[in-house]
Image (cartoon, rainbow, N blue to C red):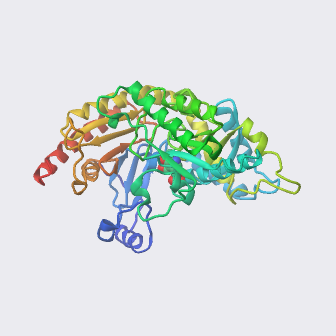
Amino acid sequence: RPTQPTRHYDAQALWQKDKDHFIHPFTDFSVFHDKGCDLITDSDGIYVSDAHGNRFIDGIAGLWCVNVGHGRAEIGQAMAEQATRMAYFSTFNNLSNAPAAELAAKLAELAPAHLNHVFFSCGGSAANDATIRLVHYYFNRLGKPNKKRILSRRNAYHGTTYLAASLTGIESNNWDFDTLDHLVTHLSEANLYRRPEGMSEADYCDQLVAELEETIERLGADNIAAFIAEPIMGAGGVLMAPKGYHARMQAVCRDNEILFIADEVVTGFGRLGHFFASEAVFDTRPDIINCAKGLSSGYAPLGATLISDDLFEVLGTPQRKGGVLSTGFTYSGHPVSCAAALANIEIMEREGICASVREVGPYLERQLKTLADHETVGDVRGSHFMLAIENVADKATKELLPVEARVGDRVAAEAQKRGLIIRPVGHLNIISPPLIWDREVVDRVVAILDEAFAATTASLRADGFL
Ligand code: PLP
């Protein structure tokens, strides 16, 4: 495993403090209490290093977010300069700050032409949560207070505030947690790999659209406010929709006065080769696009809700005398986060990162597909820098390995031993790298994964799972 000298940390003491006091999100306590966590302490470009100085290729861009790569001093300096000059001041009550104003205008320039108004939050969950609140307010203002229900999809991931978790459709995410079921109805996910046996892509698309139409018929368009969807479902397993799905879903929504919300928290900011994928890749014209993650490349917490001119006409008018748009966060438009995002976007534009993803992305897809020869690799899917490998027990039937086989964890551990971090999600492995990988890095990564899958097959066989 390649190593590099690193700032000194007392790795053991840190590990202990973390284990004793940090309640980690999405962490399996059946292993945490013994094993604790790997502490990642340093980073540089496509690499991160742990507290022991072991260096890894980052195959997940932190958590789908460090799009311009690690250790960008330029972003750090922009943040430091802003923090030193004016770290924070209110954006409520007719106050604003320079980076937030600049960033809002920049996002309006980058987004589809009709999205010119930006509501800032602190991340993706908060952006989705704030969006639903604004959507409800919008319909109340139009005199349609019954339009409340939000259509989401099974296996969608929209975050973990109470409302965002309710939109989320990954069943295990809400085990023993409550959800606001009176507000959300989940449709089927669009999952080409696991579509009904023998069904064509076009027929599958018809089936999903018909389900939407039937659901509207059943619930009544007067009771439905919006449909929210990730262009490609991320945490749910990088699920690919059939061709034309999003545009057709939007057309049905439009006919029923149902707002179309694109959750571009992952697909935005270059991951699919464009700042926003909705229009450029999926031919949709969302009423609202949400973004976070790559917006600041993870250098600071930030989310943004991009709102259409039509919606803003209503939101931007006081609801009654003395009324204000009474929603928002202390840190809406935080100057240091906005300064980070502006520096991030400047790098993306200067270095032509979207164009590079459009060039390297298809190569990454092609090379990853060579792994399909491995016994357990059932599907290699995704687009550009948003990819997943689905592990199965049987390629023909697509039957899964038992949960106890922990196949995703095994592959991830074998890759990590060889200097690459990828993300295990159940029986899947997700690859969502920084957008600065070139072909040479792709070749190294695929060689590591080739070994990791071979070692996983051997260990599954040794343990009697194959
Ligand atoms: N929406 C999507 C599509 C996401 O993938 C995520 C996070 O992974 C979120 C929303 C939630 O974002 P955050 O974790 O910043 O709250």
Q: Residue at x 35, y 35 (%)?
A: 195
Q: Residue at x 64, y 50 (%)?
A: 148
In the displayed structure image, the side of residue 106 where residue 214 appears, left or right: left
**Picture coordinates of residue 204, whole percent (x, y):** 40, 30
In the displayed structure image, the side of residue 56 where residue 296 appears, left or right: right
Nearest to the observer: residue 181 or residue 382: 181
Nearest to the observer: residue 120 or residue 147: 147
Question: In this view, which residue lies farthest toward the right?
Answer: 321
Q: Quadrant of residue 457?
A: top left
**Picture coordinates of residue 280, whole percent (x, y):** 55, 27
Q: Quadrant of residue 182?
A: bottom right
Q: Quadrant of residue 14?
A: bottom left
Question: In this view, which residue lies farthest toward the bottom?
Answer: 20
Compared with 58, 358 (above or below) is above
Q: How many marks?
A: 0
Q: Residue at x 52, y 45 (%)?
A: 152
**Picture coordinates of residue 26, whole percent (x, y):** 41, 60
> Is residue 143 visible in this depiction of the protein?
yes
In the displayed structure image, the side of residue 89 where residue 179 appears, left or right: left
Nearest to the observer: residue 245 or residue 421: 245
Nearest to the observer: residue 446 or residue 29: 29
Question: In this view, which residue lies farthest toward the front?
Answer: 218
**Picture coordinates of residue 422, whole percent (x, y):** 34, 47
> Is residue 350 visible in this depiction of the protein?
no
